[in-house]
Amino acid sequence: MNLHTFQFHQRFDQPSIADPYTETRLEMQRLCLSVQKGQTVAVTASSRGIRNIVPIMRGVVDHFRESDLKPFIVPAMGSHAGGTAESQCQLLFDYGLTESVLGCPIRSSMETIILGELQISSADAVYSDRIPVHFDRTAFDADHVFLVNRIKSHTRFTGSIESGLLKMLMIGLGNADGAGIYHRAISNDRFSAVIRQVAEFLIQKISLLGGLGIVENGESQTAVLKVIPTPDLVAEEEKLLRLAKTLMPRLPFQEIDLLLIEQIGKNISGTGFDSNIVGRKFDDHKAVQGEKPVVHCIAVLGLTPETGGNANGIGMAEFCLSSALREIDWKKTRMNAMTANHVSAAMIPLDYQTEAEIINAAWQTLGRPDPKNFRVAWIRDTLHLETITVSEALRNEAINAGYEIIKTTLEPN
């Protein structure tokens, strides 16, 4: 089968910050500090691939240092990067976050302290189980904690609070032990109850100075930086999440037969690729009613270097290249899937040696008689949708969505 393919490009007209370091410094001046000179501040660092994270973190650290405080960086990653103190430090190093660059220590430990037990309740129920509340020992030993994280849609759960500062406070700083407990306690109907009540409990137990919320635009550029005092965390994170959803990149199609993703990884999304983008937030292998696009088959072609072999999410694909399987660190992948209570995310798709074999397998599976009607799209990853490649059946939809053709080829398959 031969496919005519068309490479398209679109530039999103969205807000962006030209100088994230300066903007961070300006935002940090809004933080009202009632602290003693010389006190320590644990500043959280995420496992996600956040654009401009180095100048943003430098801006936060420089502000605290100039306020006569002693900041240090603590990884707030749950079980990511293999769930060891050394591997989480290495991940920060890979992102360019080093002690020499930041001008402060990095202190990493998977040890937690249990601050108490909490019984979760919602508007219509009080759940019988009580959960121990874990918190990173190194952060707890600091005089104060300050959160820095990107705010975005969660890949599995919905609510007015999803992935951001409060989730980092609960799951990120819960380390592997806490993250596993919280994920087991969470189901979609009580995600909001768990995250809010655990966060409220933790705020009563620690000195939290607030957080810096980061929102990125459709081109993964920094769009908003906002310092949020602790009393306003819930209300302001809700606002930033609503904004993040309006800026989120989207595939400009209603239906795709086969979506080929060049690379997946934890720096891209918690599930390797963003389930919000591909229409699989509620079911690993199909869109539920109302989700768009409807993607019938997904193929993973490889892993990002930054993910360090963690292929969590590959089980949500139907196909992959055999070479992608050889890139996987199964210990990291299985640990992440187990901790997140999402075992199917680590299952193995059907693998083939070449893209051509994947395309033919998907074509046979879907039973499209005429290759001209086969709706195929290639993307780099779910963070970068400025450039896409599509088959002839999707050409007009891409044009109608504002994409411009930059290259036409004939793909022999």
Image: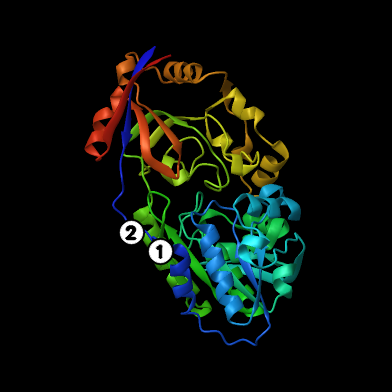
Residue 171 visible within the image: no
Q: Secondary structure at mark 1?
A: strand
Lateral position of residue 199 relative to residue 82, left or right = left
Q: Quadrant of the C terminus?
A: top left
In the image shown, does 385 or 72 lie closer to the viewer? 72
In the image shown, does 296 or 384 lie closer to the viewer? 384
Residue 204 visible within the image: yes
Instruction: Please tell me the numbered disc located at residue 344.
Output: none
User: What residue is drawn where x is 56% and y is 54%?
Assistant: 187
In the image shown, does 306 or 209 lie closer to the viewer? 306
Pointer 1 or 2: first along the chain: 2
Instruction: Please tell me the numbered disc located at residue 15.
Output: 2
Name above or below for residue 136 compared with residue 276. Answer: below
The amino acid at mark 1 is Val
**Residue 90's x, y, as percent?**
69, 51
**Residue 94's x, y, as percent?**
63, 49
**Residue 240's x, y, as percent?**
41, 65
Q: Secondary structure at mark 2?
A: loop
Name above or below for residue 57 compared with residue 340. Answer: below
Which residue bears the numbered disc 1?
Answer: 224
Name above or below for residue 167 compared with residue 60. Answer: above
Location of residue 332 (image quadrant): top right
Location of residue 207 (image quadrant): bottom right
User: Contact, CB < 8 Å: mark 1 with mark 2?
Assistant: yes
